[in-house]
Image (cartoon, helix red, strand yellow):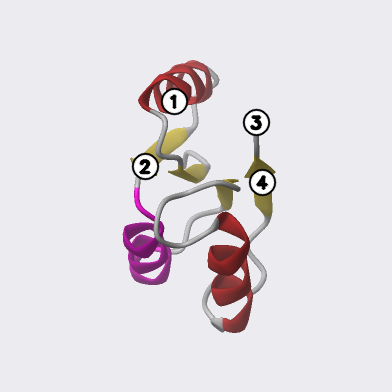
């Protein structure tokens, strides 16, 4: 079974670059450009790891991280923050 990565990133170029490299390394990548959608997907199908952009529109990566940590389903999922 492939490791499942949830990528929450609003920059399309970064998303494509990260997705391409992770998929070549045999990871299953699900990507979204919106923090609220990312929170929803993480709760519906808990990933093995989350790559989270720090600077997102509407809801910052830091706030998304806080919400993920408060949720029992995602509290222990590793999160790697991405930032420019």
What is the spatial separation of the Cα atoms under label 2 and label 1, in whole angstroms? 8 Å
Q: Earlier in the sequence, mark 2 or mark 1?
A: 1
Q: Which one is closest to the eye, mark 2 or mark 4?
A: 4
Q: Quadrant of the C terminus?
A: top right
Q: What element carries label 3?
A: loop
Nearest-to-viewer mark from 3 and 1 = 3
**Which residue shows up at 53% across the image and 65% down it?**
64
Identify the mark nearer the N-term, 3 or 1: 1
Q: How many marks?
A: 4
**Circle 2 or circle 3, nearest the eye:** 3
**Circles 2 and 3: CB atoms closer than 8 Å:** no
Relative to 26, is 75 on the left or the right? right
Q: Would you name the residue on which mark 1 appears?
A: 19
Q: Along the line of sight, which residue is nearer the eye, 76 or 15? A: 15
Task: Tell me the residue that label 2 is attached to.
Answer: 30
Residue 71 within the segment the image draws in magenta? no
Give the CA separation, mark 2 to mark 3.
Answer: 21 Å
| Real-space CA distance between mark 4 and mark 3, rounded to the nearest whole angstrom | 10 Å
Q: Where is residue 72 in the image (x, y as percent from the top left)?
A: 56, 84
Residue position marked by numbered label 3 in the rendering: 84
The residue segment tinted magenta is 34-45
Percent across and percent down for residue 16 are 40, 21
| Residue that carries the numbered disc 4 in the rendered image | 81
Quadrant for residue 11, please give it: top left
Q: How crowded is mark 4: few (under 14 residues within 10 Å), some or many (20 or more)?
A: some
């Amino acid at each position: 079974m492939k490791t499942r990565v949830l990528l929450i990133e609003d920059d399309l170029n970064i998303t494509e670059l990260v997705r391409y490299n992770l998929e070549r390394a045999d990871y299953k990548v699900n990507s979204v450009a919106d923090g609220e959608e990312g929170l929803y997907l993480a709760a519906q199908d808990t990933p093995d790891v989350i790559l989270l952009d720090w600077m997102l529109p509407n809801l910052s990566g830091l706030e998304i991280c806080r919400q993920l940590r408060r949720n029992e389903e995602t509290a222990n999922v590793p999160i790697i923050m991405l930032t420019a």
